[in-house]
Amino acid sequence: MGAADAVPGVSGGTVALILGHYQRLVTAISHIDFEFLQMAKQRRFRAAAEHVDLRFLMALGLGIATGIVSLIGLVHWLLEFRYSETLAVFLGLVLASVWVVRCYVQAWKGSRIVAAMAGAVVAMGICLLPTSTGSASLPFLFLSGSIAICAMILPGISGAFVLLLLGVYQPITTVLKTFFKDLVHGNFEWDAFIQIVVFCAGCGFGLLAFSRLLRWLLEHHGDVTMAGLIGLMIGSVGRLWPLQAPTPETADLEMKYRVMQYFSPADWSGTSMLTLIALAVAAALAVIVIEKIGDANASCSR
């Protein structure tokens, strides 16, 4: 999940859905509630930990942090120098993942198909939205954090991409870098600190509020909700089209500031199409093989 979140257009929620612990993750987050606070206040720490599935959250958080720290450098290098090849791999992963998680829906009919189509349309619509100029005001930072964190736990929608659309990605990353750089040199900037706290508060509010809604939907309308989540994955595939390259005007800028243009196979002059197809197929086969191994191990354990 940590490595996936480092790639524009890829969501850690997609990985959670593929690996089969998406609903457990949503449920655990949604249990950070008043009952949890009461247990903690009464020093019933064991009950509080069980209520929020703390061991699971800690293990998952450690894994995400490890993925980000250990792989973000490699992912950034791949996106910088092997952009098309990297997108081809993730395209294969996502397409195969859709094939795998389709089984989470018991019967593909009626409302399930409509939900999947609606999810795909929403994801495609978000990908096509123009980037906003945004604002660095505290209310807008809070709102942006609330929206972006919701996107991060939804399969198919990248939280970083949503921040980019809202025009907040550059301001918040700049504030973070400047604040910690100044802190290392013994300077504490209150304005930057307040902006970071407000943004994080927005993320926390959005995560806790949205996870409750998502848990309710999964518990009461499981098949329809899962179909909608799969639709979000399908709709995000366009962001992973490997045949894209930066415009000449933005080619020399940092990766996050580049404007990408898409090409058809007939107009593509970059990496060999056979290479890109082979990478996508290999990634798809890897997902299917891992899923088969997981099923076999589950059967043996039963």
Image (tube, helix red, strand yellow):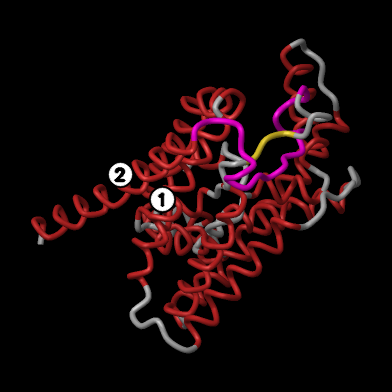
Q: Is the magenta stretch mostly helix, strand or loop?
A: loop
Residue drawn 49% across the image and 63% down it: 31
Image quadrant assignment for residue 17 = bottom left
Disc 2 crowd, CA 10 A, few/some/many (<14, 14-19, 20+):
some
Residue 216, image x and y in percent?
A: 51, 76
Asked if residue 232 lies left or right of residue 112, the reply is right
Residue 237 lies in the magenta stretch: no
Q: Is residue 279 above or below residue 33?
A: above
Q: Is residue 119 above or below residue 6?
A: below
Nearest the eye: 38 or 256: 256
Residue 55, image x and y in percent?
A: 36, 47
Residue 261 lies in the magenta stretch: yes
Image quadrant assignment for residue 102 = bottom left
Residue drawn 54% across the image and 23% down it: 73
Residue drawn 60% across the image and 54% down it: 238
Q: In this view, does 277 lie above or below 67?
A: below
Most extreme residue toward the front, as rendered? 266
Which element carries disc 1, helix, strand or loop? helix
Q: In this view, does 238 lie above or below 228?
A: above
Residue drawn 36% across the image and 45% down it: 281
Q: In which quarter of the image is the C terminus?
A: bottom left
Residue assigned mark 2: 286
Which element carries disc 2, helix, strand or loop? helix
Which amino acid is tagged 1? Leu
Q: Do the residues labelled 1 and 2 touch (CB within 8 Å)?
A: no
Which amino acid is tagged 2? Ala
Q: What stretch is highlighted in magenta?
A: 252-272
Asked if residue 229 lies left or right of residue 269, the reply is left
Residue assigned mark 1: 54
Residue 247, image x and y in percent?
A: 77, 34
